Image (cartoon, rainbow, N blue to C red):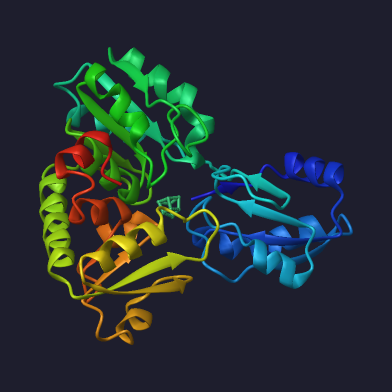
Amino acid sequence: MAFNFEHDKLVKELKKIGPKKVLVQLPEGVKKHSFEIEKLISDLGIKVVFSGQTCWGGCCVSIEEADLVGADLIVHFGHAKFIEVDFPVLYVEVRDELDLLPLLKKSLESIKNFKKIGLSYSIQHRHDLKKIIEFYHDNKKEITLSTQKGNVAYEGHIVGCQYDGLKEIEKNVEAFVILGNNFHSMGAAISVEKPVILIDVYNDKIEVMDGVRDKILKQRAISISKLKDAKKIAILVEAKPGQKFGQPELLEKAFKEQGKKVVVINIDEMTQEKLMNFYDVDCFIELGCPRIAVDDFSKYEKPIVTFKEALVALGKKTWENILETGFL
Ligand code: SF4
């Protein structure tokens, strides 16, 4: 994997903004490049502090940390802008310089029965989009990019919690091709009903995501029924500015009216170790990244549901409504 930080563009932007001190946020896979990035920025006479926090997505913008270290700019690598924040942020959409041709060729076997393909890509591959579309056109495929909806930055761009853009084009395509990793294709597979094929650039393989949707939907139904039966509920409010999915007050009031005991917990980075100390909670409702409840179903001892699922348990939304409007 060869990352391209678009050095010239970065230097130009930094010279234009003129910060004195920056907080640099790097996704986990890019943290190994900290010395290279430090040199590049400090050579401009700018002081650099790296964030040691995990940086999962554009939702993780460490404003408090930047304030704490006295930075006047956050330089956020590897993701596109996801939310508006009240702090200057420079986004650097790292390019992954890969030869995609062998994998694209391999993908043709999995989509041989489909002509109309819906296409989405993770941000590191945006620079290759033209070539990818040309390749499929040359191979007699019609390509429709997922539309730009919600927090996604571009047409065709995919993030793990927003699949409305895929749902919108679903009626016009026969299958979806996702260029990225399992995280994105799994989210797609539970959000749309048409076949989803992953071009897994990190494991150098093609994966057909058959059966994923049914399996996950069964798990979600189990978690919702556990919330309905729970006597003691904890609502987890995520501290990250981009991970505020839902209204804790609404849930607290509604579940208390049902005679349940409810606590609200502010949390940053959910882990099983942190949650297990709240040992008498029967069910957690997390209002942070909805993928934690979904992807880590078997990792946590207690059931965890998302905001939308909690609304189903309360009877304020139906299961069918969730399936129709978007699961995450
Ligand atoms: S899926 Fe989760 S980590 Fe990714 S952008 Fe959405 S909230 Fe953030």
- Dividing the picture into quadrants, the one containing residue 205 is top left
Looking at the image, which is closer to me, 199 or 211?
A: 211
* Residue at 85%, 41% in the rendered image: 16
Against 80, residue 174 (above or below) is above
Residue 189 shown left or right of residue 241 in the figure: left
Q: Is residue 59 visible?
A: yes
* Residue at 46%, 23% in the rendered image: 131
Residue 1 horizontal/vertical position (percent): 48, 50
Residue 10 horizontal/vertical position (percent): 74, 44
Looking at the image, which is closer to me, 230 or 240?
A: 230
Residue 208 horizontal/vertical position (percent): 18, 40
Residue 30 horizontal/vertical position (percent): 55, 58
Q: Is residue 296 visible?
A: no
Against 229, residue 184 (above or below) is above
Looking at the image, which is closer to me, 31 or 36?
A: 31
Residue 189 shown left or right of residue 242 in the figure: left
* Residue at 26%, 44% in the rendered image: 327
Looking at the image, which is closer to me, 51 or 33?
A: 51
Against 197, residue 36 (above or below) is below
Residue 295 shown left or right of residue 62 in the figure: left
- Dividing the picture into quadrants, the one containing residue 117 is top left
